[in-house]
């Protein structure tokens, strides 16, 4: 049985909510929610949430490379976006794959905004 899927190179949705699944050594370690708003000039703003408190993020989107980058005071993320339509169930899959780099504590403290 084959699954009908059509690869797509469509643009990033202007507003989207994503489920976040992260793994280390192929074991799931984090589940969360990412909310993104695509702004003019290929900029992105949104929040990421793992335990109930949304953390603001900013980033950029390179349409031609299908690459997305996020920056915030605790980590930096760079990855690629794959989009495909599953025509059998009429569902569009948007998949980010990339590398998350946690920033050292001294960098975090120096770049955190005062409360």
Image: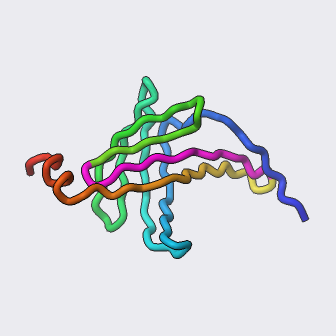
Horizontal arrangement in the rendering, residue 84 relative to residue 50 (left or right): right
Residue visible at 51% across and 52% down in the picture:
98
Colour scheme shown: rainbow
Residue 85 inside the magenta-drawn segment: yes
Going by the image, does 88 lie left or right of 8? Answer: right
Residue 60 place in picture, x, y as percent:
42, 35
> Which of these two is toward me, 58 or 101?
101
**Residue 85 position within the rendered picture, expressed as x and y whole percent measured from the top left:** 72, 47
Say which quarter of the image contains residue 53.
Answer: bottom left
Residue lying at 50% horizontally and 59% vertically, measured from the top left? 19
How many marks overall? 0
Q: Is 13 in front, or is 65?
A: 65
Specify the segment rendered in magenta.
73-87
Extreme-top residue of the structure? 41
Residue 101 at x, y percent in the picture:
38, 55
| Residue 100 shown in magenta | no
Left or right of 8 on screen, residue 33: left
66 sits left or right of 107 in the view? right
Residue at the left extreme, as displayed: 114
Prevalent SS, magenta region: strand
Q: Residue furthest bottom?
A: 27
Using the rendered view, name the quadrant where residue 11 is placed. top right
The N terminus: image quadrant? bottom right
Q: Residue at (33%, 68%) from the top-left corner?
A: 51
Measured along the vertical axis of the image, is residue 99 above or below residue 41? Answer: below
Q: Which residue: 43% across, 42% down?
A: 69
């Amino acid at each position: 049985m084959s699954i009908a899927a059509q690869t797509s190179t469509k643009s990033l949705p202007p507003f989207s909510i994503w489920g976040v699944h992260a793994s280390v050594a192929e074991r799931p370690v984090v589940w969360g929610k990412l909310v993104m708003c695509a702004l003019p000039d290929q900029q992105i703003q949104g929040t990421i949430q793992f335990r109930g408190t949304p953390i603001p993020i900013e980033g950029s989107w390179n349409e031609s490379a299908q690459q997305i980058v996020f920056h915030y005071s605790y980590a930096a993320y760079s990855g690629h976006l794959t989009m495909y339509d599953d025509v059998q169930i009429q569902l569009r899959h948007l998949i980010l794959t990339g590398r998350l780099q946690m920033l050292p504590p001294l960098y975090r403290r120096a770049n955190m905004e005062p409360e």
